Amino acid sequence: MGGSKMPNVYEINVEGGMSSLSIANTNLHEHVPNEAPIVSSYNDRIRPLLDTVDRLRNLNVMKEGIQLPTIVVVGDQSSGKSSVLESLAGISLPRGQGICTRVPLVMRLQRSTSPEPEIWLEFNDKRVDTDEEHIAEAISITTEAIAGSGKGVSDTPLTLHVKKAGVPDLTMVDLPGITRVPVNGQPENIYEQISGMIMKYIEPQESIILNVLSATVDFTTCESIRMSRQVDKTGERTLAVVTKADMAPEGLLEKVMADDVSIGLGYVCVRNRVGDETYQEARMQEEILFKTHPLLSMIDHDIVGIPVLAKKLMQIQGTMISRCLPDIVQKIKEKMEVSYFELNKLPMVMTSTQEALMTFMNIIGSAKECLQRILVQGDFIDYQDDQTMHSTARLADMLGQFSNNLHAQPVIEEFLMDEIKVLEECKTIGLPNFIPRSAFLAILSQRIDAIHTKPVEFITETWDYIEGVLLSVLTKYSENFPQIQSSIKRAGRNLITKIKEQSVNRVIEIVEMEKQTDYTCNPEYMTAYTQKIAAQENFIYTVVNNYSNVHSLTAYGFGEVTVSHLRTYDAQLLRQAFDMKVRITAYWTIVVRRIVDNLALYLQFSVKNLVNNQFHKEIVADLVSPGGGGEVEKMLEESPSMTSKREKLKNSIKVLKESKEAVATIADQNSG
Ligand SMILES: Nc1nc2c(ncn2[C@@H]2O[C@H](COP(=O)(O)OP(=O)(O)OP(=O)(O)O)[C@@H](O)[C@H]2O)c(=O)[nH]1
């Protein structure tokens, strides 16, 4: 059919001041494009908005995370989606029983005053011109180019532009029909692929869901209803089109009136083109059907026919666009600010070794300042929400836990038996009321051996933690230089390994010192000894005088202890053992505190030393030294990831800038 002979699908009929779209003049040769003033004014108002949204869509602003108001056509397989679009556009789309729509088909219908329709397809920045006769074929070919020749689907959109007299100004996206069971040639996960694609389009609040339902089925069983209700529970942005009214007129009125599936924007019942009918014949038949059919004519005329659907869609689209535009303007502004900020944060491209060296020194300098804040000063401005990086507090926690762990009293198996065993082995020929010093040191040594791994574990864990903090800081400050990031981190790791080794040796020494010598000038030792030894005579008397009914005693400072096993020993040995127990108990408190204090001071000292002296010196030496392998020079070559990040940001800014310009006039009009 020649373009010039194509009639308008709709023309406007003004009755009693009310505008309505009605069936076009079916006399092809006599047709003259004709528009009523009220609709012209509606179009004049809405058209610039639509153009703006279309321009934004063209700029692919959706890629920048900005959603545009879109009419999304969904429906179960063969529900008649493409037929509805055909009817709206007055063109042929691939139609059939199997899966025809395999990619998102964006249909941009644009009313034109030119008698010659202009039709073209766009995908992946390619343009394919076509005409009315060949659209279906062109869509099939381009679909194959996008999604392959099988029955698979792809989410790369294909845009069909139809600029033609009489079409409604609408942009809609047709999506593949939902199918539960893969037909031959379809991948096993076809349902997941299609439903995922549909969800992506219908989820944004800006989308209008045009749910195509076949009159021949029970609406409540439609998969497309189930999906649209997931994202639009109340149905406030869902409009239902009931196709195939001619095939199942019985009960259609009741189905629509009952609204079992909660369609907020209402229903429109239609009859699409059947067989080889022309669009005009189809519209005629549709009008006749809803006027004359005994059951279908009962349905309110405001909800039947393609022209009614077109008008409703244009109104909904207009309202949605006006509602969303201020938000879109705001979002473009915000996204642009963020992109500019991100771009400015990226490092400059360096051209000389000096520049690279200076940048490297800045990275290390900034990392050092940050470490000072979190490891020394307790200032967490850099990591407000990350408690693991609040290092002064975490180190205090770790020390507190270590102290509690060390202070925990060892479980006494048999009271005084450790002391008795040691005393028996250390006895010499001499006066009975002296405790051999070797016995005391042996008991002390036993106690130290029992805990000696704890301080080493503590210091190792502490440096593991500090290593994590240091690496996080280095990663953060070198994130723009992935080409040297791993070297900087390696240098950081080396430094901590070195310090950790020194610390472990130092701690082993601290513990060893406690083992070698028993000394304190702390008066608490004597106070504790005097308090506890006072109970000695009473204790020995009770045990030795063999009150066999007494199995346990409460000894001051030791709680309740069993004594029956002690009766076989003589009083002198028991006295010595008791004395030693009291001494070691009083002294152990001092030892544990001294270890904790020493470790605390040493830790503070070495952390400060790390931050204030070693960090800068050693990392710089590691990377800048002649043996450093020219690490800093690597900064001169920008890493591919950084180049692509920069390009991406520049691209985003370009798109957002053009989008801003596209919405500027509308925004001005709105604010004015
Ligand atoms: N009688 C009658 N047949 C219709 C009507 N609407 C669609 N059909 C037929 O139903 C079949 C499926 O229609 P399509 O438009 O291809 O359905 P679809 O939902 O786009 O199909 P897929 O994209 O494959 O899921 C075609 O043979 C159409 O001719 C209608 O209102 N009346």
Image (cartoon, rainbow, N blue to C red):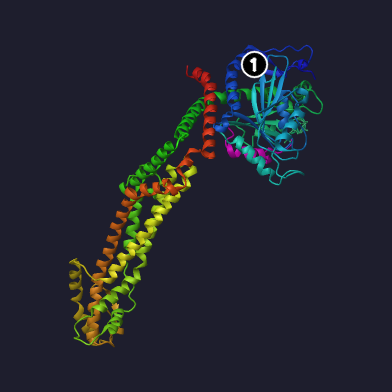
Report if residue 224 lies within the magenta region: yes
Up-down: is 634 above or below 135? Answer: below
Instruction: Tell me the element at label 1.
Output: strand
Residue 276 left/right relative to 242: right
Report if residue 179 lies within the magenta region: no
Q: Quadrant of residue 344?
A: top left
Up-down: is 485 above or below 163? Answer: below
Nearer the observer, 369 or 596: 369
Q: In which quarter of the image is residue 455?
A: bottom left
Q: From where the camera sits, is residue 80 visible? A: yes
Q: How many labels does the image show?
A: 1
Q: Residues within 10 Å of mark 1 (few under 14, many from 20)?
A: some
Q: From where the camera sits, is residue 244 visible? A: no
Picture coordinates of residue 66, whole percent (x, y)? 54, 31
Q: In which quarter of the image is residue 587?
A: bottom left
Picture coordinates of residue 259, whole percent (x, y)? 64, 34
Nearer the observer, 496 or 411: 496
**Quarter of the rendered image showing ligand 1:** top right
Up-down: is 213 above or below 22? Answer: below
Q: Report the residue at 67% width, 27% height from top.
A: 107
Tell me which segment is drawn in magenta. 216-236
Residue 633 left/right relative to 153: left
Picture coordinates of residue 40, whole percent (x, y)? 63, 14
Is the residue at mark 1 in contact range of ligand 1, meaning its CB lies under 8 Å from it? no
Amino acid type, mark 1: Ser
| Residue at the limit of the structure toward the front, as seen here | 626
Q: Report the residue at 53% width, 36% height from top.
A: 643
Residue named by callout 1: 19
Q: Report the residue at 36% width, 45% height from top.
A: 368
